[in-house]
Image (spheres, rainbow, N blue to C red):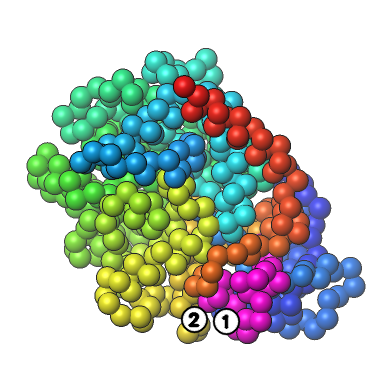
Amino acid sequence: MNAVEPLNLWAPRAWLPGGWAEQVLLRSDENGRWVEVRAQVGLPPPGALALAGAVLPGLVDGHSHAFHRAFAGLAERFDAPGAGLHSWRALRDHVAARLTPELLQAVAAHLYVELLRGGYTHVVEFHDLHQQPDGSPYPDPQRMAWALADAAQEAGIGLTLLPVLREHAGYSRQPLAETQRRFGRDLERTLAEAQALAGSGRPLLHAGLGVHALSAVTPQALAQLARAAGSGQRVHIQIAEHAKYVQACQEALGTTPVQWLAQQDLLGRHWTLVHATHVGDDEVQAIGRSGASLVLCPSSEANLGDGLADLARWIEAGVPVALGSDSQVTRSWSEELRWLDYGQRLLRQQRQGTVKPNTPSTSGAGRLWTMAQQGGAAAAGFERWGLVEGARADLLVIDTADSSLLGVPAPQLLDALVFSSPGRYWRDTVVGGRFVVRNQLHPHSAAIAGRFERAMRSVWSV
């Protein structure tokens, strides 16, 4: 990581592993990592910058398709029976066909600034838009990946980039349709891209591997990818998202997707399953035993009508659960947490929260937050995350002067932030020891927004 100016900060309150703590000193080093986190220090020490509000760690967005931002909110026309998912896919393919690397960077940079403003300081990008529109590789095969990396660097957000393996369409192994050619990539090129990203030396950039779906790869390629990843690289797979996907797997392989992974001994601590909405109790237990983690995307899964995860089962099985923005219809973790918890209340027809991780907090939002913080770290592959020594120096300063938080008692600040009306919650944001937002201002947001607007005109011009 490039050297940064060490930070010497003091917060009136901060969320540490045990919950809220008072009068917290936070010092980072030239590598952008916390070297001291200490509560009950009294007044700000000499030379320390007193932050203007209570502090939370940043959160990881565990699953993002950046290019979907170009049609977020535009797929809500239902002018024919069964048009819902069909029209969504048609818009996705329209956008995918028109995005150049330059346009992708413009869209992604705008999204990443929005995610910063939504409280995320790191994003796991499920990168599946690889090729030129005709399906051929760019002269630089990693051209689209570098566009995303440049966008994240410009925004100032941390990025775990997952090149996605997608060999064919369906268990019958049909070639990808013309509208899907840009998404295709074989194992050799997938591994080469991950290696190039990992060796780039870019600050805040990490590399993992993605699998589009069990139906999109051969068992041989999946086994080779798992061996290549070893235990030091995250592998994300979209799985059991729709009931019909599970049925197709049962017809083709004689078992469900998660059961098949378990039978092949492919699950482990470096694996992350995305969605896993339609799974049985035995599958949840298998994932829990394996040490794999899970990403839920509440607003996207609701928007697409995928189904509702039974969160209590995952928590009871000890599976780390992260949040993902996925199709970008929501770009704020507080709204995602609210969606997640309200869905569970409706599912059980009771108000008592289902999330009870290892925390002394009785706060519903506090328990949800602890779950998402731990799950996000697992999804990104971070051993240490949060306001703890050795973790990357990320934080969010809550704007308690925001109208939605005025007068809220300090111990219930997080509850109000998640379960009260949305607001502009974050006054300042630090990523890797650098302030990327100060007093709600991002230094490049105007230029980035202008490029995004021009990109949208290009994508949607007739």
Q: In front of the other: label 1 or label 2?
A: 1
Find the distance from the CA under tag 1 to the CA under tag 2. Answer: 8 Å
Residue 125, compared with residue 428, is above or below; it is above
Residue 394 at what x, y percent from top left?
A: 65, 59
Decide if residue 324 is in sight here.
yes
Can see residue 158? no
- For residue 363, which numbered disc appears in the image? 2
Q: What element carries label 2?
A: loop
Q: In which quarter of the image is residue 350?
A: bottom left
Point out the image quarter for the N terminus.
Answer: top right
Q: Is residue 376 above or below residue 215?
A: below
In the picture, residue 81 is in which quadrant? top left
- Is 397 on the left or on the right of 381, as rendered? right
Q: Which mark is residue 429?
A: none
Disc 1 residue crowd, few under 14, some 14–19, many 20+, Cα 10 Å: some
Circle 2 packing at 10 Å, graded few (<14), some (14-19), many (20+), is some
Q: Which amino acid does label 2 sit on?
A: Ser
At which x and y percent is residue 333?
51, 60
Kindly state the secondary structure of the residue where label 1 is placed: helix
Up the image or down, 236 lies above or below 29; here it is above
Q: Mark 1 points at which residue?
A: 412
Q: Earlier in the sequence, mark 1 or mark 2?
A: 2
What residue is drawn where x is 43% and y is 47%?
326
Span colored in magenta: 395-417
Residue 381 point in image, percent of width and height: 49, 52
